[in-house]
Amino acid sequence: MAKAFDLLLAILGKHFGKRGSKIIVCLVLMAFGVSNNEIRKKFGTSFDSLRKYRTALENEDIEKLFVTQNADSRMKSELLNFDEQIMNDFNVNPPKTVREAQERIMLLTGVKRNLTRIRAYLLKRGLKIAR
């Protein structure tokens, strides 16, 4: 039986990735009454994850288990709060270097970011500035 689940993991892994296939196999085992301890021993899944899987299975809501972390849940740059103010200032008088942009952003917003972050912020807005 262990070989069968290893084969199932390999097949599912091609379509759902390692994480997705592991979740599917754990859900199937849970549906057939296999204990969390046995599943944990076989796959090394944490008790917290198994509890989350079992709750999703009992509530018939397994969709959220397969949602990867999306862009909405990522931390947003604090500079986005000042986006309009920064872009208005830069449209009137574009900075010549990233260091100048960094200094002006600090004066405008009080937010200090390293040069790499400032450059990434400006590139996302279509501004190409010399280093």
Image (cartoon, grey):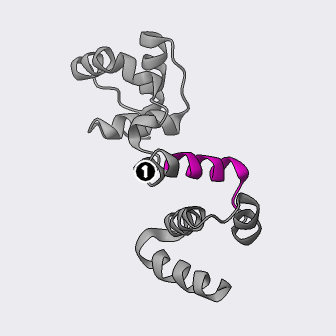
In the image, 57 versus 49, the foreground residue is: 57
How many residues crowd around disc 1 within 10 Å: few (fewer than 14), some, or many (20 or more)?
few
The region drawn magenta spans 45-56
User: From the viewer's perspective, is residue 128 above or below residue 92?
Assistant: below
Residue type indicated by callout 1: Val
Q: Is residue 41 left or right of residue 115?
A: right
Q: Percent x, y for residue 58? A: 51, 48
Give me the residue at 49% from left, 16% from top.
Answer: 106
Give me the residue at 51% from left, 39% from top.
Answer: 116
- Extreme residue toward the left, this view: 92
Predominant SS of the magenta segment: helix
Q: Percent x, y for residue 36? A: 71, 58
- Was residue 48 drawn as part of the magenta stretch in this picture? yes
- Was residue 77 drawn as part of the magenta stretch in this picture? no
Q: Is residue 72 left or right of residue 1?
A: left
Disc 1 is placed on an element classified as loop
| Quadrant of the snapshot with the C terminus | top left
In the image, 52 versus 107, the foreground residue is: 52
User: From the viewer's perspective, is residue 37 above or below residue 68?
Assistant: below
Give me the residue at 54% from left, 21% from top.
Answer: 112
Q: Is residue 31 left or right of residue 81?
A: right
Q: Percent x, y for residue 38? A: 74, 67
Query: Which of the 4 image quadrants contains residue 82?
Result: top left
Tell me the residue that label 1 is attached to: 67
User: From the viewer's perspective, is residue 50 above or below residue 15?
Assistant: above
Give me the residue at 48% from left, 20% from top.
Answer: 103
In the image, 77 versus 4, the foreground residue is: 4
Q: Percent x, y for residue 22? A: 57, 67
In the image, 104 versus 53, the foreground residue is: 53
| Quadrant of the snapshot with the N terminus | bottom right
